[in-house]
Amino acid sequence: MTKFALRVQCNSRRGIVAAISGFLADQGCNITDSAQFDDGETGNFFMRVSFQSEEGRGLDALTEHFAPVAEQFGMESAFFDESAKRRVIIMVSRFGHCLNDLLYRARIGALPVEIVGVISNHMDYQKDVVNSDIPFHCIKVTKENKPDAEARIMAVVEETGAELIVLARYMQILSDEMCQKMSGRIINIHHSFLPSFKGANPYKQAFERGVKLIGATSHYVTADLDEGPVIEQDIVRVTHAQSPRDYVSLGRDVEAQVLARAIHAHVNGRVFINGNKTVVFPPSPGSYASERMG
């Protein structure tokens, strides 16, 4: 049986859950996992439902027959196949820990993605990427050529059909135009527990303040630098005895894990943008299972 999921976002009102569950039952579908959130402050309602199509209904038929329900409640809705891998472009500069982690997770099936290309403004990781049978694109960026460079980046995105751009420590600021064009489809990892210690050397700032926790933040990219809706965060403990270099080393592991979890949530349709924030539902049972171990 095919496993599908449905994402729904609309204004909160009575009868939404009943309408969705009733529709799926009428279409010969069995709900296997469901999560919902009613935001009392904004009046927004969010829901994600995993289900099995037991009578062979496909995505096109489900979408077509659900249209009257969506119209009745003013829903933004989308059905998708949970087993389908999302096409992803990774962008990286000279810090390769997140890139290497994502290449490995994709290879063993721990992330349901197909990495269709890696873009960098340096050549450091060309061999690693090519050895993974993934196209590598070196696109240099300067103040003078930035519009042309971004046009080349977007050409790669469009040619590959990429649904998501991942900034895996890509140390270039994207233009407002690109951020708006790819709104909700660019995820960044920031080597800091935002909103504290912003800038180029947050670990040094954290060290100088004597913090006991350092962390990383993954968020959607917007035109406001490092201000996009937060998807995932995590922390690691440090002590007075550790140096800024220790902080960097410990932070690398947290960054890789946080970015991977954010991508997993996004490609599984678990993230909803809610103004300046996000609603992130927990993973469905079995969604972290790998195709192979090791």
Image (tube, rainbow, N blue to C red):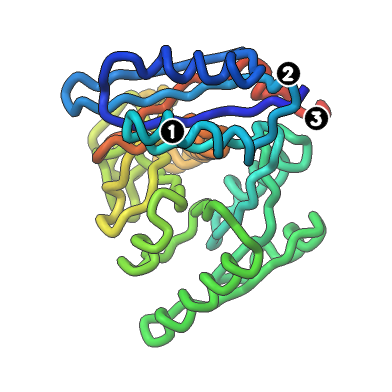
**Does residue 152 appear to the left or right of 280 in the view shown?**
right
Q: Nearer the viewer, mark 3 or mark 2?
A: 2
Residue 107 drawn at (x, y percent): 77, 42
- Report the residue at 23% width, 35% height from top: 209
Other residues around mark 1 within 10 Å, as few (<14) / some (14–19) / many (≥20): few
Label 2 to label 1, Cα distance in Å? 22 Å
| Gap between marks 3 and 2 measured at Cα | 24 Å
Q: What distance separates the C-alpha of mark 3 from that of mark 1?
A: 38 Å
What percent of the width, then of the height, locates residue 215?
Answer: 39, 32
Q: Is 290 in front, or is 103?
A: 290
Is residue 242 in sight in this rendering? Answer: no
Residue under numbered circle 2: 54
Question: What residue sits 52% from the left and 20% below the top?
Answer: 23
Badges 3 and 2: C-beta atoms under 8 Å apart? no
- Taking the spot 40% from the left edge, 81% from the top edge, the residue there is 147
Identified by mark 2, the residue type is: Glu
The three-letter code of the residue at mark 1 reads Pro
Q: Is the C terminus in the top left, top right, bottom left or bottom right quadrant?
A: top right
Residue reaching furthest to the bottom: 144
- Reply above or below: 281 against 247: above
Tell me how many marks there are.
Answer: 3
For label 2, the SS is loop
Q: Position of residue 74 (x, y in %)?
A: 32, 35
Residue indicated by mark 3: 291
Q: Which residue is mark 1?
A: 68
The answer, for residue 21, to whether it is visible in the render is yes
Considering only order in the chain, which callout, 1 or 2, is on the residue closer to the N terminus? 2
